[in-house]
Image: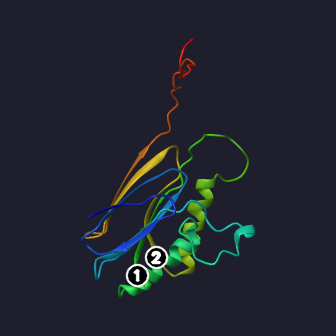
Amino acid sequence: MDVFLQPGEYFAGDAQHRVRTLLGSCVSVVLWSPHVRIGAMSHSLLPGRPQQDASGPMLDGRYGDEALRLMLEELVGLGVRPAHCRAKIFGGGDMFGARHPGPTVGQRNGEAAREQLRRCGIEVASESLYGDGHRQVVFDIATGEVWARQTPRSTRQLPVLPEFRIGRSA
């Protein structure tokens, strides 16, 4: 069964599932337990919740740190020990090409994902991070394989359409 993740969503399931998403500057963390063929995948927009929103009552998959906690809770509920998981990280692309000092949103997302996994004691087996454009990502929970295809952002200008009005003419 195919599952498509929208931004801020995550999924945990068994070998019957294939999980897909489309990432720009967002990051997906994939966790997989080869012993039981159960895995999880997230689609996070930001590394963590902004301080002014810290009073939120529930964990939120839009934030990488909270999405990881949610996935780990789901996996434990399915009988998976986090120490038995292999992790992969995808995304963090530069969608706008603006040159400014400091890391991009995508770079902050990628670095935060690495650090969060390290703190949980989960080794990162592979990653496909950064660069220009977006990535299509597909995770086959049955095999643990993840396919990622990166598409550079377009440098082509879209045509400007003439202005028009809808309505009755006099």
Q: Name the residue under label 2.
A: 71
Q: Say which element carries label 2.
A: helix
Q: Note whether 131 is above or below 60 in the view shown.
A: above
Residue at 50%, 44% in the rendered image: 133
Q: In which quarter of the image is residue 50?
A: bottom right
Q: In which quarter of the image is residue 64?
A: bottom right
Left or right side of 113 for 11: left
Q: Note whether 48 is above or below 95 in the view shown.
A: below
Left or right side of 99 for 2: left
User: CA separation, marks 2 and 1?
Assistant: 6 Å
Kind of residue at disc 2: Met
Is the residue under label 1 in contact with that under label 2 (CB below 8 Å)?
Answer: yes
- Residue 129 in the image, given as x and y percentages of width and height: 50, 56
Mark 1 crowdedness (10 Å alpha carbons): few <14, some 14-19, many ≥20? many
Q: Quadrant of residue 62?
A: bottom right
Q: Say which element carries label 1.
A: helix
Q: Note whether 101 is above or below 77 in the view shown.
A: above
Left or right side of 61 for 102: right
